[in-house]
Amino acid sequence: MSKINVALLGYGTVGKGVYSTIESHQNRLQRLLGKEVKVVAILVRNLEKHVAPDDQVLLTANFEDILSLSDLHIVIDAIVGREPGFTYLKKAIDKGCHIVTANKEMFAFHGTELQTLALEKGVGLGYEATVAGGIPIIQTIRQLLQVNHFQKIEAILNGTSNFILTNMRKLGSTFAETLQLAKENGYAESDPTNDIEGYDALYKGMVMSQLIYGELPCIDSVKRKGITHIQPQHMKVAEEAGLRFKHVVALSKSNDEIQCKVEPVLVTDSHPFYQVEGVQNSVSITTDLLGTLQLQGPGAGMFPTASAVLEDIIQLENKPKASPAAKNSVTDQDTLLQWVIFCEYPEIEKSGQEISVIEKLDDTTWIIEGEVIPSGLSHSSSTNIFPLKGRYERKKLPLQV
Ligand SMILES: NC(=O)c1ccc[n+]([C@@H]2O[C@H](COP(=O)([O-])OP(=O)(O)OC[C@H]3O[C@@H](n4cnc5c(N)ncnc54)[C@H](OP(=O)(O)O)[C@@H]3O)[C@@H](O)[C@H]2O)c1
């Protein structure tokens, strides 16, 4: 093999970034891999929108043209959605190609099957770009899994929702106004549902679950909540109490069941996510040996994502060394939890349960503590409850209501 021939599926933000980075980093790639890396074909949906970047690159809207290339070594998936990406990658593996994907939704649902097929066929599979863009989270988890037992992972994995929450607080604006600002700045798509309702973050949590625990969370135990119900009043009260809203993915395992939650939480200034602002992503990993490690950086964008894809290309020949991940976890011992609750005081009384109120922030906002959220409160439609992370220090004597 004199060259490493690559086909790119998709030529949008990620595809273009990967193409131009392969070109700009050609010398470096040749030194690392011993051969030239050449994009020989690009697949798009609508041919009329595109021009091939050079006349030696086949630009096509027909995947069969790519499959019929005689000397193809790597297929990179930078298209959108579960299909046709899954089918295309299965065919590419069957042909004996290594595959690299940035397509998180496809990989969240079909990652396990693709990994099995790749193993059977003896080809490499990279998916670093599916979680947190440029942050090397998949490599880091793989590395840690060799000796560490995971307790929990918490992460801010969606730049759009973090941008909105940051700017609602800074500008005092409503959710709708701030979403519009995100669109104007290119940080939200015309249909932002996947980002603001937490689906995008959930897909990334699913990818990490497969890697760490060897399986997906049971669908009944998955909790996914978006950020659309957060109001300027919530922001104001939280800000005055020194708390910030973050849209967090939390992954852990207890009693052999994987817990995966995507929800807005409030963090104190002692929590590592307090300073994670704007479109930044951050991942916090807690293990038995390591304690807590935090990674932070750009979770999306043309070049951060291209960086992750190129890292995968370089690593394709290195098979993961981690032992079966399902055995490799321990339960998070943190049982005493705190919440911020926005409701009328009588509703707390109506719940009929003993609640440890550790601070009253104003007439409708309370900080409470316990092992589980009282069910009477969590089912009330006029009540908004947000988990509180980073341990809030009580400023007044405890109250029992
Ligand atoms: N953008 C990021 O920062 C980022 C970061 C990490 C991961 N990702 C993931 O990477 C993937 C690509 O994202 P992107 O932002 O580059 O999307 P994009 O800008 O919308 O580009 C998508 C590309 O895929 C092509 N495509 C879509 N469906 C296709 C089909 N059925 N057959 C052939 N080509 C098809 C499109 O062709 P046409 O142009 O002809 O329509 C377009 O060139 C997504 O799965 C995304 O979740 C994105």
Image (cartoon, grey):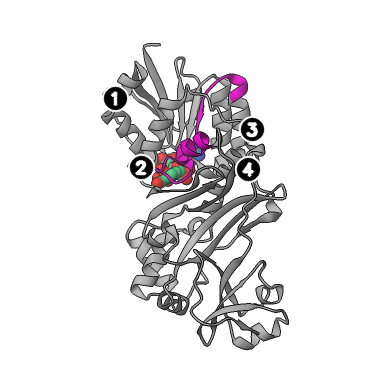
136 part of magenta stretch? yes
Which image quarter has ligand 1? top left
For disc 1, the marked residue is: 28
Left/right placement of residue 34 relative to residue 284 reads left
Mark 2 or mark 3: whose residue is earlier in sequence: 2
The kind of residue tagged 1 is Arg
The image shows residue 25, relative to residue 158, as above or below, that is above
The image shows residue 341, relative to residue 14, as above or below, that is below
Viewer-side residue, 139 vs 157:
139
What residue is drawn where x is 41% and y is 55%? Answer: 159
Mark 4 or mark 3: whose residue is earlier in sequence: 3
The kind of residue tagged 4 is Ser
The image shows residue 57, relative to residue 384, as above or below, that is above
Segment tinted magenta in the rendering:
119-144
Left/right placement of residue 23 relative to residue 114 reads left
Badge 3 residue CB within 8 Å of ligand 1? no
For disc 2, the marked residue is: 304
Calculate the distance from the C-alpha at mark 2 to the C-alpha at mark 3.
Answer: 30 Å
Calculate the distance from the C-alpha at mark 1 to the C-alpha at mark 2.
Answer: 17 Å
Disc 2 secondary structure class: helix
Badge 2 residue CB within 8 Å of ligand 1? yes
127 part of magenta stretch? yes
Mark 1 or mark 3: whose residue is earlier in sequence: 1
Marks 2 and 4: which is nearer the front? 4
The kind of residue tagged 2 is Pro
Query: If the image is split into quadrants, where does the N terminus sit?
Result: top left
Q: Which disc, if any, is residue 324?
A: 3
Q: Which disc, if any, is residue 329?
A: 4
Residue 181, quarter of picture? bottom left
